[in-house]
Image: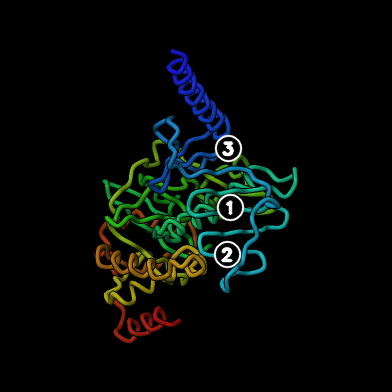
């Protein structure tokens, strides 16, 4: 009888301990998000990410948490590291003076520590939901592209381009025309060709925000010291489920000079798979991180599969927000053939040679 009582008491204590641990986890991670196909638990509010539909605590979820960088284990950095970005397979660490320290580990945890008390959550979030989560996703073997993805009529279009190429300005124009935002700044594509919901905040420079008619004085800065504004679209203009990727556009940095009345947005399909593959590789989110995480071969395989599944096009935009808005009234990015340019053969060869350059 005493043995049975002891066994029951042991089980009760074990259950109580598990419940205590669960309550501690719930208290620590007050925020639950669903992005990139992951359940993300965070001790910091991240309004840029979609809220997870379930309030249940998922043991397999990614954790974002404050942690003293002095307590992180020592790291033998590989040859792809820099003085401020230290990396080894499965470990990514970024130090930004005046902002803080960040660490993505094993595709499971994203830790951070602010530089001092003057650093705001917004300053930290700028790097947590972009560079930090991108590194963590690469550790998990995901295909992470430097692109913004929008949706219309159940089809997704991805806009690839370097910073300041016009991705966010074009995305904002498209939103004003009825498109919905799926992921901003970085996009993750599954093996089935689906793009997962990601950060849903557009970042606009002052001139673009003013030209778009936005009340920039009421918009929060992306982070201190940077005249760039954060724009969170209304819930009706975002998507919370993965969407099939229909088209990929790589934005050209060159603005096309046009005659009055001529369409100012042009596309040109990338016919050769090798060129399309190089285009995706060059727009992978931080290729250096892929090499440091031993994921470059995986990047090649995933990008190759995507080029076979989805058409890629080069996109040339007009200079100026007003001209871009006017041009978008005449074209449909879901029908690139209707606005495809017909350059001379020598221009085509020149453009592809430039794309193939290392």
- Mark 3 nearby-residue class (10 Å; few <14, some 14–19, many ≥20): some
Residue 343, visible in the rendered structure: yes
Residue at 48 percent across and 53 percent down: it is 107
The residue mark sitting in front, 3 or 2, is 2
Tag 3 residue? 43
Residue 322, visible in the rendered structure: no
Mark seen at residue 62: none
- Choose the circle earlier in sequence order: 1 or 3: 3
Residue at 51 percent across and 58 percent down: it is 135
Residue 355, position in %: x, y?
A: 40, 78
Q: Quadrant of residue 93?
A: bottom right
Depth check, front residue: 253 or 40: 40
Mark seen at residue 87: 2
Quadrant where the C terminus lies?
Answer: bottom left
Depth check, front residue: 211 or 194: 194
Mark seen at residue 127: 1
SS for callout 2: strand
Q: Mark 1 to mark 3: distance in Å?
A: 15 Å
SS for callout 1: helix
- Mark 1 nearby-residue class (10 Å; few <14, some 14–19, many ≥20): many
User: In the image, is residue 209 above or below residue 85?
Assistant: above
Q: Mark 1 to mark 2: distance in Å?
A: 16 Å
């Amino acid at each position: 009888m005493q043995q049975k009582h002891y066994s029951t008491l042991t089980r009760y204590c074990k259950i109580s301990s598990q419940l205590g641990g669960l309550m501690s986890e719930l208290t620590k991670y007050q925020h639950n998000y669903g992005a990139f196909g992951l359940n993300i638990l965070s001790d910091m509010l991240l309004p840029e990410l979609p809220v997870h539909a379930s309030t249940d605590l998922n043991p397999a979820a990614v954790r974002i948490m404050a942690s003293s960088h002095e307590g992180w284990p020592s790291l033998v950095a590989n040859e792809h590291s820099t003085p401020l970005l230290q990396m080894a397979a499965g470990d990514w660490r970024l130090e930004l003076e005046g902002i803080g320290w960040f660490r993505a580990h094993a595709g499971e945890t994203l830790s951070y520590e602010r530089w001092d008390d003057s650093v705001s959550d917004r300053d930290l979030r700028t790097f947590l939901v972009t560079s930090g989560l991108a590194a963590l996703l690469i550790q998990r073997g995901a295909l992470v592209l430097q692109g913004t993805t929008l949706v219309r009529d159940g089809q997704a279009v991805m806009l690839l381009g370097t910073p300041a190429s016009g991705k966010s300005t074009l995305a904002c124009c498209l939103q004003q025309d009825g498109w919905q935002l799926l992921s901003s700044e970085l996009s993750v594509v599954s093996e089935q060709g689906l793009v997962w919901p990601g950060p849903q905040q557009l970042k606009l420079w002052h001139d673009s925000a003013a030209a778009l008619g936005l009340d920039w004085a009421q918009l929060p800065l992306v982070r201190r010291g940077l005249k760039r504004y954060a724009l969170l679209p209304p819930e009706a203009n975002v998507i919370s489920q993965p969407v099939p990727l229909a088209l990929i556009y790589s934005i050209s940095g060159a603005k096309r000079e046009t005659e009055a009345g001529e369409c100012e947005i042009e596309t040109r399909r990338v016919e050769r798979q090798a060129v399309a593959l190089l285009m995706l590789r060059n727009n992978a989110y931080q290729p250096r991180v892929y090499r440091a995480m031993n994921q470059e071969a995986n990047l090649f395989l995933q990008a190759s599969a995507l080029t076979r599944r989805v058409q890629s096009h080069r996109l040339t935009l007009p200079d100026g927000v007003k001209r871009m808005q006017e041009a978008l009234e005449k074209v449909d990015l879901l029908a690139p053939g209707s606005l495809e340019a017909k350059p001379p053969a020598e221009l085509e060869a020149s453009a592809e040679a430039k794309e193939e350059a290392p």
